[in-house]
Image (spheres, rainbow, N blue to C red):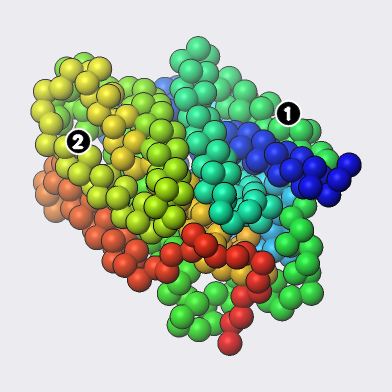
């Protein structure tokens, strides 16, 4: 086999396993939002308890993601991208299976925490591996495939949850994870990583805080993704509550809302990825989608009396407008050198996911201030998260043409 054919085969294999891994990752990550009400009702919870316990369990899962993001990121730069792809999928697949047998919110929370730790490594390691194997002029196409395929996992979660009970849905996720784990045997490690094994500060998470320039570059990578989980973690997870206040004609199902939103994200990710290739700029593509996303939420919060199908279509439209997740992750990957790249690419999306914790606390605080109005609380949250994202993006350097074969200096 020629060197060129070997590299092509390695790249295709990496894209496939990263895509399928992200598929299962997203399946599990948003499955809780889909089965939240039914699973908590099986424990005897009703009314306000469903919202309060749901937010608490979501925060526990996100805390696991934060811890796991740091752990897997450091291991990805020290041990290799494949090490993380194997370890993370094993942990969250096992946690998924355990989740099928819980009978209290305490054990439920423990399983979500463990699953969060496992889930944290999947996307970052996959995107890093693919980006380092792909020629720079076509990186956007490969990462678009990985992200778009991954988000389809939410659709799978919705249909599985619709066909089976919530316990079976978690068990199916665990089985899928172990199957994909077997498919990863034989996938090649990144050549760029192999060449950087002697570099200083490999996987040193704390080196990112060593100087002002590096820290703010890292912080900006996180902040431009803040709106994504404002929408997913607050608006879509609590869509039944928003549906009541907005007088939607019918009972809104959170699973259906998340599925429609995620279907929209699939198209948005593909469009934003292709747009960045066409404009040859990641930053310009994110500007466009941030503006569209903010506009879509204004429409979401100002509609009244929509039919149930129209409400779900609106959730899908919000998903399309917010579908810049793939570009956001690619930007983080391209901003830093090989010795710290996996750490950044893994921790950045998980800090954004973990931002649901302060965002949900702010949402609850605003609800108290606005006498329980979730529309007013959501509106203020949109202004804050999108304003921060726009400010962060203004200071970001475009990385479309950047060569990734370099070492990050922390002087």
Tell me the residue that label 1 is attached to: 179
> Where does the image place residue 346, in percent across and percent down from the top left?
58, 56
In the displayed structure, does residue 238 sit left or right of residue 281?
left
In the displayed structure, does residue 76 sit left or right of residue 44?
right
Marks 1 and 2, how far apart in space? 39 Å
Element type at mark 1: helix
Tell me the residue that label 2 is attached to: 300
Quadrant location of the C terminus in the rendered image: bottom right
User: 243 or 319, which lies in front?
Assistant: 319
Q: Which residue appears at 54% of the width and 44% of the height?
A: 141
Question: Which residue, as the protein is rendered here, is positioned at the far bottom?
Answer: 411
Tell me which corner region of the image, top left, top right, bottom left or bottom right, holds residue 246: top left
Element type at mark 2: helix
Mark 2: give few (<14), some (14-19) or many (20+) Cα within 10 Å: some
In the displayed structure, does residue 157 sit left or right of residue 226?
right
> Where does the image place residue 203, in percent across and percent down from the top left?
67, 68
Q: Which residue appears at 74% of the width and 75% of the height?
A: 199
> Where does the image place residue 298, in percent across and percent down from the top left?
17, 42
Instruction: Please give the label number shown on residue 388.
Output: none
> Where does the image place residue 103, in percent across and percent down from the top left?
54, 28
């Amino acid at each position: 086999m020629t060197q060129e054919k070997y590299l092509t085969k390695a790249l295709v294999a990496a894209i496939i396993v990263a895509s399928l891994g992200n598929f299962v990752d997203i399946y599990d990550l948003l499955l809780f939002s889909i089965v939240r009400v039914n699973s908590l009702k099986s424990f005897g919870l009703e009314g306000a308890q469903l919202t309060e316990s749901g937010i608490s369990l979501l925060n526990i899962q996100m805390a696991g993601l934060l811890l796991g993001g740091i752990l897997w990121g450091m291991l990805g730069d020290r041990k290799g991208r494949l090490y993380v792809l194997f370890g993370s999928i094993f942990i969250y697949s096992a946690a998924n299976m355990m989740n099928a047998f819980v009978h209290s919110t305490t054990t439920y929370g423990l399983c979500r925490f463990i699953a969060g730790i496992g889930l944290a490594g999947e996307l970052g390691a996959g995107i890093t591996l693919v980006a380092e194997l792909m020629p720079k002029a076509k990186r956007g196409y490969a990462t678009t495939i990985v992200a778009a395929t991954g988000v389809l996992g939410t659709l799978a979660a919705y249909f599985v949850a619709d066909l089976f009970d919530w316990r079976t849905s978690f068990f199916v996720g665990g089985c899928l994870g172990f199957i994909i784990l077997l498919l990863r045997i034989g996938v090649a490690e990144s050549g760029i990583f192999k060449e950087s094994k002697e570099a200083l500060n490999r996987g040193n998470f704390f080196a990112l805080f060593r100087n002002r320039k590096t820290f703010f570059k890292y912080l900006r990578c996180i902040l431009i993704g803040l709106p994504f989980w404002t929408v997913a973690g607050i608006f879509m997870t609590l869509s039944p509550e928003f549906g009541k206040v907005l007088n939607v004609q019918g009972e809104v199902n959170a699973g259906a809302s998340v599925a429609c939103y995620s279907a929209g994200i699939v198209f948005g990710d593909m469009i934003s990825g292709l747009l960045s290739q066409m404009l040859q700029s990641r930053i310009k593509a994110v500007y466009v989608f941030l503006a569209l996303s903010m506009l879509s939420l204004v429409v979401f919060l100002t509609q009244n009396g929509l039919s149930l199908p129209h409400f779900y279509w609106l959730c899908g439209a919000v998903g399309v407008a917010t579908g810049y997740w793939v570009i956001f992750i690619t930007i983080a990957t391209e901003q830093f050198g090989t010795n710290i790249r996996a750490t950044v690419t893994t921790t950045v999306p998980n800090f954004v996911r973990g931002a649901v914790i302060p965002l949900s606390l702010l949402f609850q605080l605003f609800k108290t201030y606005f006498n329980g109005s979730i529309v007013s609380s959501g509106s203020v949250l949109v202004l804050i998260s999108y304003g921060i994202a726009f400010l962060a993006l203004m200071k970001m350097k475009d990385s479309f043409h950047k060569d990734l074969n370099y070492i990050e200096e922390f002087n």
